[in-house]
Amino acid sequence: MTNEEVAKDLIRQFGEDVYDFDDPYGMLTLSTTREQIIPMLQYLNTHPIYQISFLTTLCGIHYPDDPNPEREFCVVYQLHSLVNNFRIRIKVFLAEADLHIPTATTVYLTANWMERETYDFFGVIFDGHPKLTRILNMEDMDYFPMRKQYPLEDPTREDKIDALFGR
Amino acid sequence: MSTVLDISNKNAPGNNLPAKPEESVQYVNELTTLNLGPTHPATHGIFQNILQMDGEKIVSGEQTIGYIHRAFEKIAERRPFYQITTLTDRMNYCSSPINNFGWHMTVEKLLGVTVPKRAEYIRVIMMELARIADHLICNGILGVDTGAFTGFLYLFEERENIYEIYEEVCGARLTTNMGRIGGMERDLSSEAIRKIRAFIKRFPPIMREFEKLFNRNRIFMDRIIDVGGITAERALNYGFTGPNLRAAGVDYDVRVMNPYSSYQDFEFDIPVGKSGDTYDRFMVRNEEIWQSLRIVEQALENLPEGPYFADAPEYYLPPKKEVYRNMEALIYHFKIVMGEIDAPVGEVYHSVEGGNGELGFYLISDGGRAPYRLHFRRPSFIYYQAYPEMCVGTTLSDAIVIMSSLNVIAGELDS
């Protein structure tokens, strides 16, 4: 069971909807559309040989500087097959104007809090989630703190300006 | 003139009900809401659970977490790589060295640095000692929650000894910040080796005594057997890892499946349970303590000679003596301390077997001095969502025991 094997099988299964194949540090990485993400998770989960049925992480990434506005947000699913010891990383890119993605709680119960955390940090809305509220931050927070436009430190502070290193 | 409204008009239509029977007890068919936490002493941390109780039985539970959320993932986006180690300390603070080395190994994987064998063995020794300390706390406190304080007290003396070893190795006790990217910050001193040897000798009889006190104790067994059980299938779907998953019968251990830091050199067993209940979790942790001790013994016995840090001057802080004498070392020292070392572009996921399970680091580097994005896979956060399900149908006292045996660490939960 190699990266190429799984990649070819996924292309056979999902055709145009899987793209951007890569294997940084040996881990198969690919992108798909939000329409295909749940069928893909289900396919990998129930595949008789692959048995990629363990959701290791689910998190969001913000790329505000990406020239393509359709790729501003990214939701990353890292899955693991405990039978074959095979890991795969699936990315779904989303536009800021339409931050909707179907929930993975229908496949994995563990996605529940991971999705709430992603919503809490980035504002990605997981359609069909049983209870999509903030989890780590307080309920009346009115922004999504992990987005890059919110700097960690107060930008108005002048004593923090470091002219030498520019940060 | 206003008319007086006779509110006690007994003769009004509809009011002539028959007199109530003389009964003082009324049965009300409603649930009691019980607030367990956030600062309940039995929850060992700040967790809130709003339980719906039907008499003694728990009907449902709702969790509130985030009381000590410190935005580590956000802070990490501004810090140079070596400064993030201090953040990892504060996640699972019962076994900080595992977190520290897990992070170092992630960065080493990104940078492509190979760590010499001696450093890897020292890491293994410290990580296994940390695992012992972590499991000692969990199992000791499980005893306290069931009313047996003695075991906890005896074991804490041993944890203290482990902390003294930490102190000897890195100078700190709880938030250890142990090691560096590329190896250890200093070699194992002879005093540290003496302390580890003394620990290996002294610990087994105390652990045996602890097991004698609990393992076949009728009261203890009645209290925790078949409490908070979870099936293997359910546990996997909930993303359980570590001792809690192994108690349910799945032999997934990162140390064996994806060996890191020379774990393939050591011989040890993976204990597994059957029913995933509190007793199995307790027994799995007990056995893991023995296995960890075995690994420490082997690593100390076969500790290779050689350097304790990698030959990576760009990332590993040069020895202080060199900094004063050698221009190159001075430059590297300055660049590393000021965080001016740029990492290569890439994304990497690395996981280690933490005290509670698979502790993962998902690091995305855009080539800058700090990570572009860093996500921590915190096992406590992931398996704590199964807690209400495990509690339903049990009593409040069982709920306390289940939480205790899951070993939910607030720092790791909220990150």
Image (cartoon, rainbow, N blue to C red):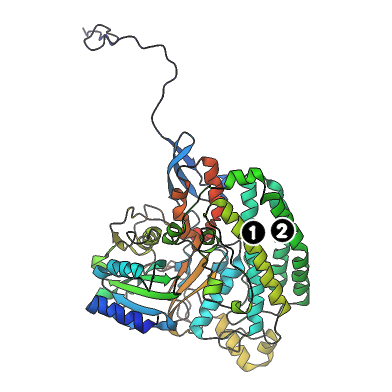
Residue A131, percent from left and from top: 34, 53
- Per the image, label 2 sits on a secondary structure element best described as helix
Q: Chain of mark 1?
A: B
Label 2 Cα crowd, 10 Å radius (few <14 / some 14-19 / many 20+): some
Which image quadrant: the N terminus of chain B?
top left
Disc 2 to disc 1: CB gap under 8 Å: yes
Please give left or right for residue A96 compared with residue B207 in the image.
Answer: left
Amino acid at circle 1: Asn
Q: Which residue is mark 2?
A: B207
Q: Which residue is mark 1?
A: B286
Please give left or right for residue B119 compared with residue B2 in the image.
Answer: right
Q: Nearer the viewer, residue A36 or A7?
A: A7
Label 1 Cα crowd, 10 Å radius (few <14 / some 14-19 / many 20+): many
Amino acid at circle 2: Met
Q: Nearer the viewer, residue B43 or A49?
A: A49
Residue at horizontal 39 percent and vertical 63 percent from the top: A145
Residue at horizontal 72 percent and vertical 60 percent from the top: B158
